[in-house]
Image (spheres, grey):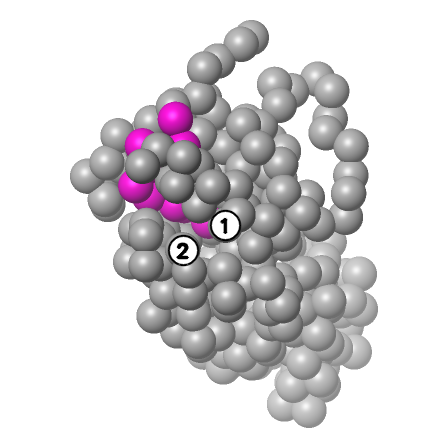
Amino acid sequence: MSRRAAPRHALRVLSLDLDDTLWDVAPVIQGAEQALRDWLGQHCPRVTARYSPHGMRALRDRLNREHPERAHDLSWMRVRTLQIALEDCGYALSLAEDAFEVFLAARNRVSLHPDVLPALDALKRRYTLVALTNGNADLERIGLDRYFNHYLSARGVGAAKPDLRMFEAVGEATGHAPSEVLHVGDDPVRDVVGAARAGMVTAWVNRRGDPWPGDHPPPDTRVGDLLALTGWLFRAASQAR
Ligand SMILES: [Mg+2]
């Protein structure tokens, strides 16, 4: 399938993925799960005695299978998992919210890649910026809310990328056509393939230098970090003048 991207100088909106695009998410989730486990061990020790980390994971996987209609809502999955474990061990269900808050606080202690703040500083002067995430990162807690005009999550939209509804939500929030939107993300399918299907221009943020998976149409541009993306965009803008 070949597709002609809209010219770069026509872009008005950047929608940005968060996890693994602005920070590495695996160590963050690992730290948050450990913080949660420490809290449970202290406040609800029968839960940690009965459920190993693997056991909690299996419980969440089971919920995922039983509730495909909530699969996009990671926060619901985690709270519901905690409720089931707490109830099973004879604790009050209300403790699930306290426990989840411990998880969330740690989940939002991310280490931004060093290119992120200088790039966002430059990009926000020229574009409407939209955060478009399948996860539950909180821009305010992270201190990034001042860069973004809109925050759209799978939880709020009711579907997860690469579902078209996520990308349509960008148009609804900003009033711009898909051809005026550049979607920026690390995931070849959820970000690049999904956004291309929605008619957006696509940028693949490939921080690890991975090969592009050959069975998918390639992105309009591939960059190693967000400053490289800024260079690509601003060169186009100056050429258009
Ligand atoms: Mg990502």
Task: Report the front residue among 54 and 157.
Answer: 157
Q: Residue at x 71, y 84 (%)?
A: 38
The image position of residue 88, as x and y in percent, is: 63, 69
State the quadrant of the N terminus.
top right
Residue plotted at (44% across, 76% down): 143
Task: Please tell me the numbered disc located at residue 230.
Answer: 1
- Give the residues in magenta: 7-17
- Disc nearer the start of the sequence (1/2): 2
Depth check, front residue: 213 or 50: 213
- The furthest residue to the left: 175
Q: Tell me where residue 29 sits by quadrant.
A: bottom right
Q: CA distance from mark 1 to mark 2?
A: 7 Å
Q: Residue at x 61, y 18 (%)?
A: 217
Above or below 155: residue 67: above
**In this rendering, would 196 be left or right of 31?**
left
Under mark 1, the amino acid is Thr
Amino acid on which disc 2 is placed: Leu
| Contact flag, marks 1 and 2 (Cβ < 8 Å) | yes
Please name the residue shown 55% across and 63% down the image.
Answer: 116
Say few, some or many: other residues with alpha carbon within 10 Å of mark 2 (under 14 / 14 to 19 / 20 or more). Answer: many
Indicate the position of residue 47 as horizontal and vertical percent values.
69, 76
Judged from the image, the secondary structure of the residue bearing numbered disc 1 is: helix
Q: For disc 1, does the CB lie below 8 Å from ligand 1?
A: no
Residue hosting label 2: 123
Secondary structure found at label 2: helix
138 or 97: nearer the eye?
A: 138
